[in-house]
Image (spheres, helix red, strand yellow):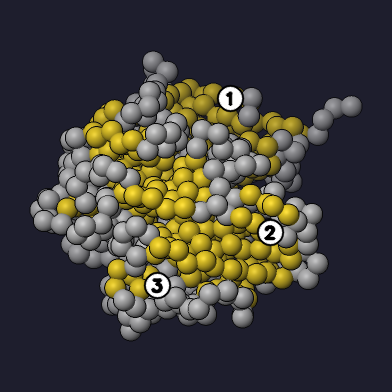
Amino acid sequence: MKNRTIHLILTVLTVGALQAGCRGDDDVIPFILVTPEQQDTFAGVSEIRLTFGEKTQTQALSGSDDKFTLEMELNLGGASPVILEGLSDGGEVICRGQSPLINAYATVETLTLFVSRVGTFGRAPIDAPLGATAMAMANYEVEDWDDDDNNDLNATLWFGGLTADATVPAQPFYYDSYFHEIYPLAQLPEPRAHMAAMNIDGGYYLLYGGVDEAGTLSGRLDIMEPGSLGFTYQPDVDYAIEQSARAQGQVVILGPHPALLAGYDQRVLNSFLVVGGRNADGVACDYLHFAAAYHTSTYDWTVTAQQRSLTGCRLGHTATRTKSATSTTAAPEIIVLVYGGGEAGDPVAEILRVTPVQPDVDTIDWGMSESAVTPDPGTMVSGHAAVTLSDRRILVIGGVTADGTVLADAVIYDPDDDSFTPLPGLLDTPRFGHTVTVLGDELVVAGGTGTDGLPLGDAEIFSVADGDPAWVGSTDLVVPRTGHQSFPMSTGTMGLMGGVDAAGEFTRVIEIYTPGLVD
């Protein structure tokens, strides 16, 4: 019996224009193609290649303004990203666009494919609803313990923040990479900036702390959950310690924990650390451990929290998760590097270790410990960035010292022996307030503030294919910015959101980086 099929249609009347293809029947997946403003995306392209799973179709172009129509017959129900690439005469990929994972079923909704030149930042087809800093950010899904990052991420949500007129936005929103649109969500019960946003499980979020428009610290805890009419907030969440108002803490995701409390009617779905920040006494010298559990018999949530001391006080620090070489799903051994942001006399770095075990069906021993790393790996810094590499090591890069020196240096932490390897002058341009993101074999250090105190308008690209980062080149941002956030996208790209531009304005421009500088 012949498999039923469906047709994927991408039709472009003029390259870069928005135009959906249509067969006039119901068995199609229609796409429109968008390219960044002020970018000649298809310059030098001689062939277009469309890919869905193992299926590929190509079409020759005679010039960058040539018209093309691509139609592909798919087996009904198959799942894959849609990938469009523009190739040079020599077969080099010049531009690229990818959708998130889609299922081969007919849709009346026209999906959007964002195509940009590789190794560049392009302006997204829509701006953010507001320009802000100090927004909380949480991904729609979290990392799985099997280390397979494929399709782990569906969307990124933003909560609160500070705008140019010092107001705090009440309405969260998310960027949808299927349609490249912004969608608003239910308003926060209490708008805050500098809060912690944590994805519990799928569409469930835990929102904690922050400051209101008056600058008052908040100890509020909210659970945001999906419902038939959109997202809602649960009242009266069980909070197991006294209210501890806090802002600017760094969030670390410890789970998910699929095996904890197995055999009981409660499931600990996820847990988090909120490390350091600012509390009523000033710089925080502790961290909070949140655990979110769901009761399968009563269909309700419980959130508990434990407060523990740090070896140093931390603000403007990073907290980055990795794991030991022997960590498994059944026996996780989580290592968190807390770096910088300390005061005089505090250690530059300390290690938090979490090794949860289940002694019986209703008890969890989290196995938490704290220890300073000695000797200190370098100068105390703040405003730096950190990221976990594919080999479990953590890269800490850039920052500014207490005397105002902006750094181009980096250091790599190895969790197997708690050692640090300095990488002096790794950056071409010293910077702080930047972001660092790993996309496959590329590492992208974007924006930040330079030695002149102004936002930087470039990103530096490194190859991490062979372990240690190796400088490849730099590329311009659409908008110079600092104090922004970067976010991974399920299209294999990354976005930049928020921050302050070169004119001191809070930018609404969203930009997307398409990797391709590293083979």
Q: Secondary structure at mark 2?
A: strand
Compare marks 2 and 3 and give the one earlier in the sequence.
3
Disc ID at residue 18: none
Dot 1 surroundings within 10 Å: few (below 14), some, or many (20 or more)? few
Residue at 73% x, 60% y is 362
Give the CA distance from mark 2 to mark 3.
Answer: 28 Å
With 501 as the anchor, is 31 left or right in this view?
right
Give the CA distance from mark 2 to mark 1.
Answer: 56 Å
Residue 270: percent from left, percent from top: 60, 56
Res 346 → quadrant: bottom left
With 499 as the anchor, is 244 left or right in this view?
right
The front one of 506 and 435 is 435
User: Which residue is disc 1 drawn over?
Assistant: 57
Disc ID at residue 363: 2
Compare marks 1 and 3 and give the one earlier in the sequence.
1
Q: Secondary structure at mark 3?
A: strand
Residue at 53% x, 75% y is 241
Residue 15: percent from left, percent from top: 43, 38
Amino acid type, residue under disc 1 in the picture: Gln
Q: Secondary structure at mark 1?
A: strand
Amino acid type, residue under disc 2 in the picture: Thr
Residue at 85% x, 27% y is 2
Q: Quadrant of the C terminus?
A: top left
Residue 312 in sight in this render: yes
User: Which residue is disc 3 drawn over?
Assistant: 246
Residue 443: percent from left, percent from top: 35, 36
Front label number (1 vs 3)? 3
Residue at the limit of the structure toward the top, as seen here: 90
Dot 2 surroundings within 10 Å: few (below 14), some, or many (20 or more)? few
Compare marks 2 and 1 and give the one earlier in the sequence.
1
